[in-house]
Image (spheres, grey):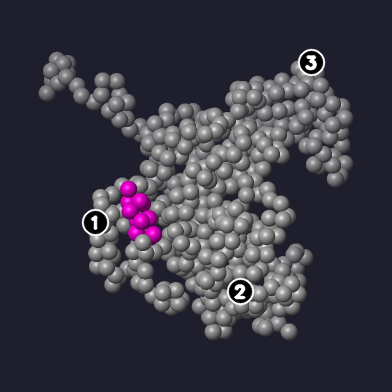
Amino acid sequence: MEYEEAKKKITEALQKKLKTKSKFYFSDLAKILGEKPRVAKKLINQMVQEGVLEYWSSGSTSMYGMPGTGKQAHAEHED
Amino acid sequence: MAKHETPMLDQLESGPWPSFVSDLKQQAEVRAKNEANIEFQIPRDVVEDLLGVLELSYDHGRTHWKHGGIVGVFGYGGGVIGRYCDQPEQFPGVAHFHTMRVNQPGGKFYKAEYLKQLCDLWDFRGSGITNMHGSTGDIIFLGTTTPQLEEIFYEMTHKLNQDLGGSGSNLRTPADCVGQARCEFACYDTQDLCYDLTMEYQDELHRPAFPYKFKFKFDGCPNCCVASIARSDLSFIGTWRDDIKIDQEAVAAYIGGEIPPNAGAHSGRDWGPFDIQKEVIDNCPTECMWMEDGKLKIDNKECNRCMHCINVMPRALHIGDDRGVTILAGAKAPILDGAQMGSLIVPFMKAEPPYTEIKEKVIEPIWDWWMEEGKNRERLGELMKRQGLQKMLDVLGFEADPRMVQEPRHNPYIFWKEEEVPGGFKRDINEFRKYHQR
């Protein structure tokens, strides 16, 4: 899958779900892309590098979200 | 005068053991006096506020830390754990109190100079509170603010040649025993394998794409000093496949009392003269040792590497020469379904650089399987339980081996696959009808 196409897929899907969810597991993103984990990882990494996605970590689990979405960024002055 | 009253924490100091509360109070005082004239980059009273929020948590019987955060250093999805206090007005010093994990040197060998540099950096840009070491083995820096993260990372990577460790759904910081650097029992170079895999799997360490955490640990011998068998998803334990080497003269010297058993480790009181029958032979779990004409004999094929005889008589008995690793998978702590010890998947494999067999035949196929089949927050050991060891062996392309069997089976059914049955499941119906009427 081309990067631009992947980016479009991810941003559209995440925008759509934004009302109920702002953080997503890696496997959710891989499912949206319809790719195997290794391929999905390359695309998702690039999206993080470009700031399309950002990491969230509880310390034990990691998730992905779009920057500035969800309550946390604003509440903790990290936006 | 302390900033916050802490009667409940003070009570913790009254016991006979060293108290973390005393340590924190000491650190609070050091920061308050600041005799070293450090230009603190985060609030000077961070430690006092930490004590305050802890007292409040004890009072309320609930935590005042929020869960997780989005902070990190650029490009890394691990190594920094966002921590925020939910009472920032009352305790501004700990409004941000992020944790950083520092990838510890192999075998936890470091010079005092290196520690001093780390501590100076952390006094300057953090709270000065460390945890030596965290459960995964990392050096843990406890408590800093978001603007300091990149600064600390830059200093560490550019001046101290030091990387961050793993956290979140990443490969966690690999941990190893001191290995051949100091230990004659080490059957492979734990530090070299640990370092090699750390460098090889940088992407897995820093960019989270696993279903959950994944830990490697490396023990040089079955004494398992880093407890890899209980604490890592993939445990590498040194072993040998030839015979234990025996120096009969040294055996006689142990029996004669010339060499203290256990290298003198139990010499604090008088245990009486060394009794090889009682202290070694009778303690062998597989009963594979005996004395014959004054010589110690071992039936090596029965040895299960408990290490007891070697530990008691290290100068008389030594690991064999044909050395490698045993690999076990799936150990974990008891969040779901109870704790699990590792299950044996590779009885013996050579562990020599560049470790291609370990990487390509064990680690990578396991990761591919777990990344595709693992549920969110499912550890490898849970996936192994859910889909079965047989499935895992299929994934790895390994034959089942009696050494993988821990106990008799609980399930009386055997499900054969077509390729496992000679001739498969297809039959010639006409041939069948010759003998069986419809």
Q: Which residue is mark 1?
A: A5
Identity, as a three-letter code, of the amino acid under mark 2: Gln
Dot placed on the residue nearer the N-terminal end, 2 or 3? 2
Q: Secondary structure at mark 2?
A: loop
Residue B323 seen from this side: yes
The answer to which of B165 and B87 lies nearer the viewer is B165
Q: Is residue B39 above or below residue B249?
A: below
Rendering coords of residue A56 (x, y %): 42, 64
* Number of other residues with Cα within 10 Å of mark 1, as a class: few under 14, some 14 to 19, many 20 or more: few
Q: Which residue is mark 2?
A: B41
Identity, as a three-letter code, of the amino acid under mark 3: Asp
Q: Secondary structure at mark 3?
A: loop
Indicate whether residue B36 is drawn in magenta. no
Q: Is residue B58 above or below residue B227?
A: below
Residue B213 seen from this side: no
Q: Looking at the rendered structure, which numbered label has been put on residue B293?
A: 3
Identity, as a three-letter code, of the amino acid under mark 1: Glu
- Tell which subunit mark 1 falls on: A
The stretch in magenta equals A39-49
Q: Is residue B38 left or right of residue B100?
A: right
The answer to which of B11 and A76 lies nearer the viewer is A76
Residue at image position (12%, 23%) is B438
Q: Secondary structure at mark 1?
A: helix
Rendering coords of residue B422 (x, y %): 29, 20
- Labels 1 and 3 touching (C-beta < 8 A): no
- Tell which subunit mark 2 falls on: B
